Amino acid sequence: MVRRMVIGGLLGGALLVSGCATKKFVQEEIAKSQEKTGADVGRVDTALNTEKSRVEGLQKDVGETRAAADAAAAKAAAAATAASEAASRADQANAKADAAGATAKDALAKATDTDQRLSKLWASRDKKTLTETVSVQFEFDKWLLNDGAQTRLLALVKELEDQSQLSVELEGFTDNIGTMPYNIGLSQRRAESVRRFLVEKGIGLPRIHSIGLGDIRPVADNKTKQGRDQNRRVTIRVYAPAE
């Protein structure tokens, strides 16, 4: 009886010991499993956080790209508007240039026509007919009119008064004594004396043209006194308008 009780006690103790060992093993296994699960969860969280950061970065890049695209589109639209306005201004400028060119062409045509008409009038004005030639002589190295010269000029004044369409050209000359510059000046003074006489007698200045030519175009031989006397002169040519 006692033996059975001892054996039962031993068996109960063995089972108690065995039960305690099993519980500890189980706890250790659970702890390992939890530790592994925690590590796996940590790795997953890290991966999720990394992916989240990458996605956020991509979203930021997409936002910046979209903003840049919108800005580029706005600039392109503004550039298109500016180009359209520039084209419109260019068309307006071309239209104005065409109008200005037409106006200039018309003005040139009118100017050409006016120039042609004026040229014809001027050519007609220069056409005149020589009606008479008168000469008055001067003393040596003198340019004042003597009595004989004034008498001849008075007859010319009467003719010019009676025919207002007549005009005169005065050419002063000298003999060949003296230098060319001096003789040209002397011949000019002689022509001026005749011109002044005619003006003082009432002949309009625009009807009179005068020039001094020195000793050129002699009408007689300068080697003789008589020839030199004839060369010291003012030749007066009377002109009437051409028919």
Image: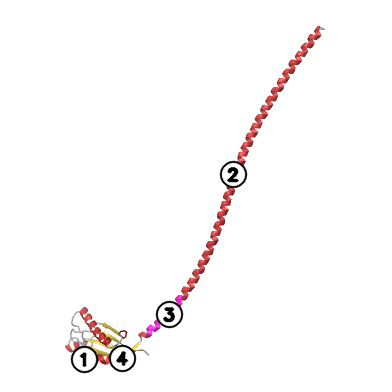
Q: CA distance from mark 3 to mark 2?
A: 79 Å
Main secondary structure along the magenta-highlighted residues: helix
Up/down of 176 relative to 65, above or below? below
- Label 1, on which residue? 148
Q: CA distance from mark 2 to mark 4?
A: 110 Å
- Dot 3 lies on which element? helix
Amino acid at the residue labelled 4: Glu
Where, by quadrant of the figure, is residue 25 drawn? top right
Q: CA distance from mark 4 to mark 1?
A: 20 Å
Which mark, residue 240? none
Q: Residue furthest right?
A: 1
- Tell me the crowding category of disc 4: few under 14, some 14 to 19, or many 20 or more residues within 10 angstroms, Cα based: some
* Closer to us: 39 or 218: 39
State yes or no: discs 2 and 1 in contact (Cβ < 8 Å). no
- Tell me the crowding category of disc 3: few under 14, some 14 to 19, or many 20 or more residues within 10 angstroms, Cα based: few
What span is colored magenta in the figure?
A: 107-124
Q: CA distance from mark 3 to mark 1?
A: 49 Å
Amino acid at the residue labelled 2: Lys
Residue 214 can be seen in this image: no
Give the mark nearer the N terminus: 2 vs 1. Answer: 2
Amino acid at the residue labelled 1: Gly
- Label 3, on which residue? 114
Which mark, residue 60? 2
- Dot 4 lies on which element? helix
Q: Position of residue 91 (x, y in %)?
A: 53, 66
Q: Is residue 34 magenta?
A: no
- Label 4, on which residue? 161
Up/down of 83 relative to 223, above or below? above
